[in-house]
Image: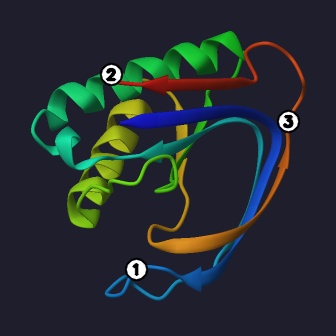
Amino acid sequence: MRVLMLYADRFAYKTSVKGLEGTQDVQEEKAIEKALVGFIHVEPQDEENLSSKETKLIKNLKWAARKNETNVIVLHSFAHLSEAKGDPEITKKLFDSAQERLQNAGYETYQTPFGYFLDIDVQAPGHSFARLFKEF
C-alpha cells in the first residue's frame, strides 16, 4: 500500500469521468476545509494481509492528522502510485472499513466518489508535515 498524505486548508472536488465500470453513477461536488487527504493506492499483495494493512493505514492517517492539528480526514482512491493495482471491490471494502474505524475514533471522515476521476482543487500550506508519503 502506498499513501500520499496532504494537509489541505481546502480540498474541493467534482466528479468528472467514471473510471471504473460497474460503479454507481454519481455527480458530486464538495469542498472540505482543514483536512488531511489520503491519496491511497492499494496493491495486489495488500489483499493477503488486508487487516494489518488497514490498521497501518489508519495509524498513519491519525498520526498525520494530529501533526497537522485536524480531526478531518478524506480517503481518496488514487491508483496512480504504482503499476500494480488491487482488486476494486476489496479496495472499496477497505475504504469503507477504514472510514468506519476513523469515525468511531472521533475523526470526521469522508470518501471521494470511488471509481471516478475528479476535478480537484487543493490549497495546501508549505510546512514540513503538510506532505507525507508512506509505503507499507
For mark 2, what is the residue?
Answer: 56
Asked if residue 98 is positioned above or below residue 52 in the image, the reply reads: below
Q: Please report the residue visible at 35 percent of the width from the left and 49 percent of the height from the top.
A: 95
Q: Quadrant of the N terminus?
A: top left
User: Residue 5: percent from the left, percent from the top?
Assistant: 61, 32
Which circle's residue, 1 or 2, is located before the other in the chain?
A: 1
> Which amino acid is tagged 1?
Leu
Secondary structure type for disc 3 = loop
Residue at the location (16% across, 44% down)? 47
Q: What residue do we see at 40% from left, 18% from top? A: 59
Q: Which residue is mark 3?
A: 124
The quadrant holding residue 135 is top left
Disc 3 residue type?
A: Ala
Instruction: Specify which label sits upstream in the sequence, 2 or 3.
Output: 2
User: Residue 97, how many percent across, how many down?
Assistant: 28, 44
Tell me the distance, in whole angstroms, between the alpha carbons under discs 1 and 3: 28 Å
User: Which residue matches tag 1?
Assistant: 20
The residue type indicated by label 2 comes to Lys
Q: Residues within 10 Å of mark 2 (few under 14, many from 20)?
A: some
- The local secondary structure at tag 2 comes to helix
